Amino acid sequence: MKTNPLALAPVAPLALAAALLAAAPARALPVDFGGYFRSGMGTSSQGGKEVCFRLPGSVLWFRLGNECDTYADLVFRSTLGQVDGTTFKSTFRFSYGTQGIANWEQTSPSWREVFVEAQDIGSGLGVQALQGASLWAGKRFYGNRDIHMLDYGFWEPNQGVGAGLENVKTPLGRFSYAMLRMGDFTGYGVNPALGGFNPDLIGGGSRSVTVHDLRLEDIAVNPGGKLALGLDLALKNNRDGRSSYTVETTQLADLDGNPATPPVPVVIRETRSFDNKPGRNGLGLHVQHTQADPFGLGGFNEVVLKFAHDAMTLRGVGIAGSTERRREWLLFDHWVMEPKGSAITASMTAGLRLAKVDGVTNKEFWIGARPQYHINNIWSLVSEVGLQQAESDGDRLGARRLAKVTLGTQFSMGRSIWSRPAIRFFTTYAKWNDAAAAAGPVTCTGRDCATPVDAYQNKRSGLSYGVQIEGWF
């Protein structure tokens, strides 16, 4: 007997649905959704899109009224279950950023976190010494510490995939250990043949560095004061042989041989090669004192001293294949004030960075504050003042300087300096010297402020104004 295929057509999707249901978990797991986002629009005293201000050679910037893009982190967390007192949780985070110029802006999201942690691993193993500790593995925003008003992460060795054991209780404080692997790559978006998988691995991952991050935190040293000590080791792990990779650069070319017509920019693709083996190890040290409620003004005060050597950076990130001879020092103070019952909150910071890389000395200094006056539980007046200075060997015009002041009003969900979401209307004015202008673009816009604004090329000050939303949940 012949079977009519059309008679079976309605049955096929039903069978497929039944199979999927049979393969599905017995119960759906609850998922917590969180994240961070910012977006804004504006213009400048020269017209066009809003502009932001950066000091060439600096590693940071005062961010209020000084961000020109749309950026978001989306986080999904789920409790997978509990076994013998140990709770297993998963976290997924992806991020994206756009230029902030249109409604439809395509972007390739970046997977920033994919990891699982086993909380209170000691209970499941029956090991008293590990009670309350967590075992984790995967790609993670591990242990990152930052100065929020600068958007500067000063301790974030989370630039790769790793594993670790954290929050082990000791007589002195909490001990944590993490091992993270960083690779060597050509950059982002340089190889279209990857089909969107960027960055491109060089030589199949021929050069890498392993970072061992050790922390002893919450060491009680005075009433309300705690000490944190850190050690970061970067150990090279390179293969033998040579590797090649492709880079794209933009150069000016004379296409018609006519001196009357200007040269045009062209993209040059170049293949380069190097010896895999060279590279250095690195060392990083971290000392931090955190004082809660200093002088009864609420908030906290952080004093941080850091040192980095050779293939280790101040942030705790190892540099794969680095042959640089590096010595860096960083000392800064970060103070957040939230007096109880007061309408005034503020954050302040001042710091000094000294670096000597392959014999070239760089110095950087900053100082600034963000005071905020809360008219009621939603409406506040906010401002930010910042001064930056940077200097390098051989600077013909001396130290580079940038001063910036932002005035604005804000509508947020509460009186705290951390209250978010916050809708801000702002005006930002910046002034810089000849040395800063000669060192590179001071004004920029777009994602990561990567697009120079040539309208300010021959100027030494600028004004930008607009509206921004920032939030986290």
Image: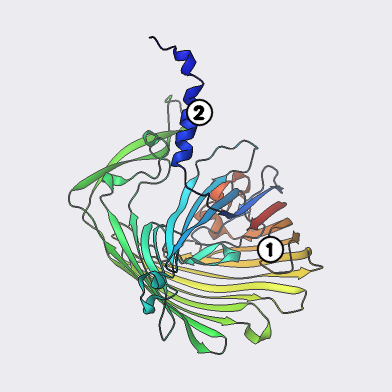
Q: Amino acid at mark 1?
A: Val
Q: Where in the figure is residue 143, as x and y percent of width and height?
A: 46, 67
Please tell me how crowded label 2 is: few (under 14), some (14-19), or many (20+) other residues with Cα within 10 Å. Answer: few
Residue drawn at x 61%, y 65% is 149
According to the picture, the residue beneath numbered tag 2 turns out to be: 14
Q: Return the residue nearer the eye: 454 or 330.
A: 330
Q: Return the residue nearer the eye: 49 or 148.
A: 148
Q: Of the residues under marks 2 and 1, which one precedes in the sequence? A: 2
Q: Which mark is residue 405?
A: 1
Residue drawn at x 61%, y 76% is 335
Residue 307, by quadrant, is bottom left
Q: Where in the figure is residue 387, as x and y percent of width and height?
A: 61, 67
| 192 vs 409: above or below | above
Q: Where in the figure is residue 7, as x and y percent of width and height?
A: 48, 15
Q: Which marked residue is nearer to the observer: mark 2 or mark 1?
A: 2
Q: Amino acid at mark 2?
A: Leu
Name the image quarter holding the C terminus. Answer: bottom right
Residue 217, by quadrant, is bottom left
Residue drawn at x 66%, y 56% is 470
Q: Is residue 300 visible?
A: yes
- Secondary element at image label 1: strand
Extreme right residue here? 375
Please tell me how crowded label 1 is: few (under 14), some (14-19), or many (20+) other residues with Cα within 10 Å. Answer: many
Q: Where in the figure is residue 79, as x and y percent of width and height?
A: 50, 58
Image-based side of 212 in relation to 295, left or right? left
Image-based side of 87 in relation to 272, left or right? right
- Secondary element at image label 2: helix
